[in-house]
Image: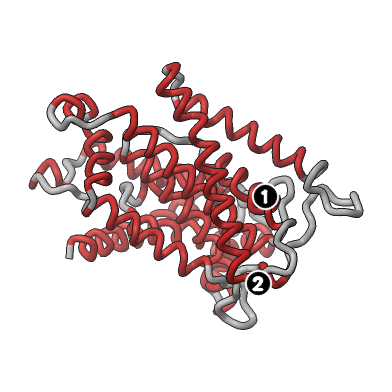
């Protein structure tokens, strides 16, 4: 029941945020001199205006956002400010692309799990670099993960112009993934792939792990009060933090490999439109609850799908929606700062874990 209450609260919060987003977007459109009604109509059509828009635009964007949002949530719950989900996602996609070349003749039933595992391991290893720097040399993870994002971006650019470039050497991208290795499509005539089932499963497993296991409790304890966790709880704080780094990277790497096998089918420059950065907002607006991340990721998926349609059909720059997303984060953080949490009032963890 705790999970149901938490998910219901997050869903209600998402509804309020959606109303605020539309209101703020209308104000920004007026300020920038755009026609409000045509722009908002185009946005609604692009996000939820048709069966295809919902399944092939909004939900498919939700999948990488939710996985990367879970990565950020796990790290933040451990008190780790992992800003590197974007780089870990790119490295995960690159690893899945690299190993796909050796899977010729293998069925999707075997090939897809291999690529997903490869991407997850690569993402975890990339996050482990920042974790080692933090624990061994005291380098702040905010700095190291941001720098690693840039390295991952340039590494991806080098790969698609070098070792992983398609055989004709015409375009800076990898060879297209063989059809038999692509993520199965759930609904005929849409882009909705099996990754949506995977992300729901991962969210539920993450929530259960944080709530019901000793290792999940240790992670939450370290994130709440590391000094007390070490002195009163006898918890190995550095080891727990490093494990959270690795798990966060694994989830972000999984996001990249799912996007590669389910949507893009190729690695190229600008592979991610900033999913790893938007995931920070997804996690914060869900208050770091793994199940709530699904709802907030769906909200941001709708906003981004609508933004593309608004730019295409009404000539409104999609960056306007990015401004709205940033304002939503500021509003939520301000509200949390000045409103006592449920935990403060009742002693119950508001996240449900």
- Residue lying at the far left of the rendered structure: 346
Q: Quadrant of the N terminus?
A: bottom left
Count of labels in the image: 2
Q: Is residue 327 above or below residue 297?
A: above
Q: Residue at x 20, y 49 (%)?
A: 350
Give how far across and how far down residue 259 sits, in percent.
60, 58
Q: Is residue 259 above or below residue 190?
A: above
Q: Nearer the viewer, residue 344 or 303?
A: 344
For the residues labelled 1 and 2, the Cα–Cα distance comes to 25 Å
Residue position marked by numbered label 1 in the rendering: 271
Residue position marked by numbered label 2 in the rendering: 107
| Crowd band around label 1 with a 10 angstrom C-alpha radius: few (<14), some (14–19), many (20+) | many
**Left or right of 343 in this view: 162:** right
Q: Secondary structure at mark 2?
A: loop
**Left or right of 15 in this view: 347:** left
Give how far across and how far down residue 281 sits, in percent.
43, 45
Which dot marks residue 52? none
Label 1 or label 2, whichever comes before in sequence order: 2
Q: Is residue 181 above or below residue 205?
A: below
Give how far across and how far down residue 180 sits, in percent.
69, 72
Q: Residue at x 48, y 56 (%)?
A: 300
Residue 48 visible (yes or no): yes
Give how far across and how far down residue 84 sits, in percent.
51, 37
**Badge nearest the viewer, 1 or 2:** 2
Picture quadrant where residue 345 is located: top left
| Crowd band around label 2 with a 10 angstrom C-alpha radius: few (<14), some (14–19), many (20+) | few
Q: Residue at x 58, y 67 (%)?
A: 57
**Colour scheme of the picture:** secondary structure
Q: Nearer the viewer, residue 31 or 107?
A: 107
Q: Secondary structure at mark 1?
A: loop
Q: Residue at x 41, y 47 (%)?
A: 328
**Left or right of 302 in this view: 9:** left
């Amino acid at each position: 029941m705790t999970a149901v209450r938490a998910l219901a609260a997050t869903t209600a919060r998402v509804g309020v945020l959606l109303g605020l987003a539309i209101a703020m977007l209308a104000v920004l459109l007026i300020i920038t001199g755009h026609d409000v009604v045509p722009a908002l109509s185009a946005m609604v059509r692009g996000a939820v205006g048709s069966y295809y828009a919902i399944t092939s635009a909004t939900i498919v964007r939700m999948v990488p956002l939710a996985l990367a949002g879970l990565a950020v949530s796990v790290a933040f719950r451990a008190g780790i400010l992992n800003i590197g989900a974007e780089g870990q996602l790119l490295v995960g996609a690159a690893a899945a692309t690299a190993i796909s070349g050796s899977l010729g003749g293998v069925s999707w039933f075997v090939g897809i799990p291999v690529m997903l595992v490869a991407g997850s391991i690569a993402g975890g290893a990339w996050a482990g670099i920042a974790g080692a720097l933090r624990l061994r040399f005291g380098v702040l993870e905010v700095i190291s993960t941001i720098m690693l994002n840039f390295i991952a971006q340039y590494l991806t650019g080098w790969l698609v112009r070098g070792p992983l470039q398609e055989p004709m050497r015409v375009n800076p991208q990898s060879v297209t993934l063989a059809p038999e290795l692509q993520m199965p499509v759930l609904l005929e005539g849409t882009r909705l792939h099996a990754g949506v089932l995977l992300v729901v499963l991962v969210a539920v497993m993450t929530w259960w792990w944080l709530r019901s296991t000793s290792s999940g409790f240790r992670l939450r304890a370290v994130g709440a009060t590391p000094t007390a966790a070490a002195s009163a709880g006898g918890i190995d704080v550095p080891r727990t933090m490093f494990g959270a780094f690795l798990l966060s990277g694994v989830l972000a790497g999984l996001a990249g490999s799912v996007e590669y096998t389910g949507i893009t089918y190729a690695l190229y420059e600008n592979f991610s439109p900033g999913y790893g950065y938007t995931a920070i907002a997804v996690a914060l607006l869900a208050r770091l609850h793994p199940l709530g991340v699904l709802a907030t990721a769906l909200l941001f998926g709708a906003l981004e799908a609508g933004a593309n349609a608004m730019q295409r059909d009404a000539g409104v720059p999609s960056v306007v929606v990015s401004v709205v997303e940033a304002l939503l984060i500021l509003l939520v953080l301000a509200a949390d700062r000045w409103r006592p949490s449920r935990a403060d009032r009742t002693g119950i963890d508001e996240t449900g874990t």
